[in-house]
Amino acid sequence: MRLGAHVSVAGGLCRAFDRADSDRCEAMQIFTASGRAWASPRPDPGEVREFSAEARRRRAPILAHDSYLINLATGDSILARRSRDAFAQELERCEALGVDAVVLHPGAHRGDGVEVGLPRVAAALREGLRRTAGYRVSVLVELTAGQGTSLGSTFAELRWLLDEMGSPDRTGVCIDTCHAWASGYDLVTDAGYDATWRELDAALGLGRVRAFHLNDSRRERGSRVDRHAGIGDGKMGKGVFRRLMTDPRFQGVPAVLELPPDDVRKGLRRLRRYRGRPILQAG
């Protein structure tokens, strides 16, 4: 795996590269705009050019996480419009910046039911892909913990969304290890680890896994609660991360930690030891 972290863009988008370098990241994830506000200033054109040039020079995977305000499963017409517009704008920003993929949560149906919420998400994603036809940036649907009425906590739901979205060259999934554990997948035992990836392969195909979020969990398996812990310091323990680092099926896939800076540094040191060797970066 190409190891990295979600890094801050405080002080300017290009500061993310310096922060990634300080942790020897081989991949990184950013917010291209505020993750908790609808209105965000348009990036300075010069900053966009500088970022995209540096992204091309490095040729290392760059992910962006969409805003936490976006809910593509909502039945509220105003929130739905805002969410669809914000998602399309995210794709436009990422294309200009040279970001490889946008990672998104499918959203929450808020009591309307899975059978109603999932089609809303699929329709919104199709619209976003249509509005950005010809773009290079990919869309990765993230496996969720299933907290509340959140959608996308099973491989079957992810498969349904991918099938409905179409555009397989621009779509895939991001597997968050904490979310997988919280939603009930056993990644820890030998039998559970093997069974989880067999189920995913049967539902999606392992090739649709285009990114990982590597996080341990503070809560028990099946809790459906999303609470990240440092690598090997939570309920999952070190074993699953040792296995992932040497699993040839995920070689070269970007894998970022979503943790506080001290936990990122500690986690990356552990993961590099488990992996056993660095990945050389071009440029």
Image (cartoon, helix red, strand yellow):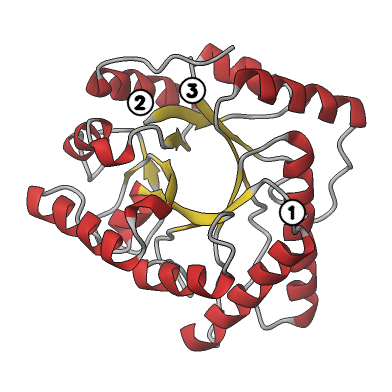
Q: Quadrant of residue 272?
A: top left
Q: Residue at x 75, y 35 (%)?
A: 97
Q: Residue at x 49, y 21 (%)?
A: 25
Amino acid carrying label 1: it is Gly
Instruction: Examine the rendering and report whether any part of residue 81 can be seen.
Output: yes
Residue 175 placement, left or right of 71: left
Numbered label attached to residue 26: 3
Q: Quadrant of the N terminus?
A: top left
Above/below status of 66 relative to 128: above
Judge by depth and name the residue closer to the eye, 134 or 199.
Answer: 134
Look at mark 1 in the image and give the residue it sits on: 134
Q: CA distance from mark 1 to mark 3?
A: 27 Å
Q: Dot 1 surroundings within 10 Å: few (below 14), some, or many (20 or more)? A: few
Closer to the chain start, of discs 2 and 1, is 1
Which numbered mark, 3 or 2, is in the foreground of this view? 3
Q: Residue at x 23, y 36 (%)?
A: 247
Q: Dot 2 surroundings within 10 Å: few (below 14), some, or many (20 or more)? A: many
Local secondary structure at mark 2: helix
Check whether the beta carbons of the residues at disc 3 and disc 2 lie within 8 A of each other.
no
- Measuring from the top left, give residue 113's x and y in whole percent: 50, 87
Local secondary structure at mark 3: loop
Above/below status of 232 relative to 122: above
Q: CA distance from mark 2 to mark 1?
A: 37 Å
Above/below status of 207 relative to 152: above
Numbered label attached to residue 267: 2
Q: Quadrant of residue 117?
A: bottom right
- Measuring from the top left, give residue 207's x and y in whole percent: 38, 51
